């Protein structure tokens, strides 16, 4: 199940889906929906770990500079935080903390770090992050169970950690962040670590607030 596409379908919003067609994606990022226009929201999500580990970071910063909201799901910052992702992390006010790998599903529970933040309250409240899956789990240990990466706030950060691996740590162990005045929502763990019923309401909140930020900036 493609979590994000299914959530968009449930919401009834109009969108263009490039799936895993990387060439289409690059063309759409470059050209926009129509000549001279910008996208309202761009979602770049590496849901398939067998897919391309692409450099979405430059495209993300360019889109934000042009006024577009962006939601980025990426689980491989452990290999890019000192190179292609460094500029984005600096602008977001984040620092790479740890590679969350070889964590069994029983220990992959997540916690709200800013429970009163509107992104965790609207339009869905009472979100839970405890229903884990074995989607990427290999009990034989042959395939590494790479959940993603944990982030921490830099010393002068204006970002907000939304969700993380340890309760009551609002500055550390984050797996989801909002920054750049709400224009970027960055999730650094794979959505499929949790069940669709856990993640779809969160993704709906992400999308709702990213679009609201875009429209507020247009007014």
Image (spheres, helix red, strand yellow):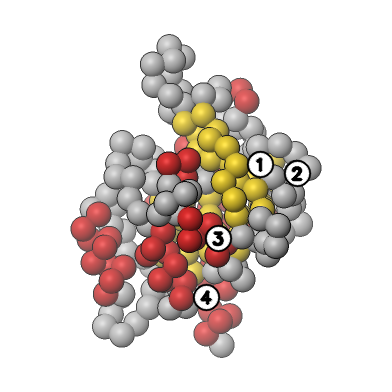
Q: Are marks 3 and 2 in contact (CB under 8 Å)?
A: no
Q: Residue at x 71, y 37 (%)?
A: 166
Q: Which residue bears the numbered disc 1?
A: 173
Looking at the image, is mark 4 or mark 3 nearer the viewer? 3
Residue 214: image tag: 4
Looking at the image, is mark 1 or mark 3 nearer the viewer? 3
**Quadrant location of the N terminus in the rendered image:** top left
Which residue appears farthest toward the right when viewing the image? 168
Could you tell me which secondary element the residue under label 3 belongs to?
A: helix
User: Does any portion of residue 108 appear in the rendered image?
Assistant: yes
- Residue nearest the viewer, comparing 81 with 191: 81
Looking at the image, is mark 3 or mark 2 nearer the viewer? 3
Image position, residue 177 (x, y; %):
60, 55
Mark 1 → mark 3, Cα distance in angstroms = 17 Å
Residue 169: image tag: 2
Looking at the image, is mark 4 or mark 2 nearer the viewer? 2
Could you tell me which secondary element the residue under label 2 belongs to?
A: loop
Q: Residue at x 39, y 21 (%)?
A: 143
Q: Are marks 4 and 1 in contact (CB under 8 Å)?
A: no
Mark 4 → mark 2, Cα distance in angstroms = 29 Å
Mark 4 → mark 3, Cα distance in angstroms = 22 Å
Image position, residue 25 (x, y; %):
27, 60
Mark 4 → mark 1, Cα distance in angstroms = 28 Å
Could you tell me which secondary element the residue under label 4 belongs to?
A: helix
Mark 2 crowd level (few <14, some 14–19, many ≥20, 10 Å Cα): some
Q: Residue at x 33, y 45 (%)?
A: 53
Could you tell me which secondary element the residue under label 1 belongs to?
A: loop
Residue 90: image tag: 3
Image position, residue 187 (x, y; %):
53, 50
Q: Earlier in the sequence, mark 3 or mark 2?
A: 3
Q: Earlier in the sequence, mark 4 or mark 3?
A: 3
Mark 3 crowd level (few <14, some 14–19, many ≥20, 10 Å Cα): few
């Amino acid at each position: 199940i493609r979590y994000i596409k299914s959530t968009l379908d449930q919401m009834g919003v109009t969108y263009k889906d490039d799936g895993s067609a990387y060439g289409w994606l690059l063309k759409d990022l470059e050209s926009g929906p129509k000549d001279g226009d910008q996208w309202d929201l761009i979602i770049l999500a590496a849901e398939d770990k067998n897919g391309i580990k692409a450099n979405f970071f430059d495209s993300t910063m360019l889109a934000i500079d042009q006024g577009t909201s962006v939601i980025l799901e990426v689980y491989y910052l452990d290999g890019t935080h000192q190179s292609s992702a460094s500029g984005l992390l600096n602008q977001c006010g984040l620092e790479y903390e740890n590679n969350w790998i070889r964590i069994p599903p029983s220990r992959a529970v997540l916690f709200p770090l800013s429970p009163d933040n509107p992104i965790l309250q609207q339009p869905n409240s009472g979100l839970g992050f405890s229903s884990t899956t074995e989607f990427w789990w290999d009990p034989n240990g042959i395939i590494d169970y790479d959940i993603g990466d944990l982030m921490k706030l830099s010393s002068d950060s204006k970002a907000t950690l939304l969700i993380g691996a340890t309760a009551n740590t609002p500055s550390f162990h984050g797996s989801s962040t909002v920054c750049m005045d709400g224009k970027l929502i960055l999730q650094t763990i794979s959505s499929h670590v949790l069940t669709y019923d856990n993640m779809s309401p969160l993704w709906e909140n992400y999308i709702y607030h990213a679009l609201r930020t875009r429209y507020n900036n247009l007014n």
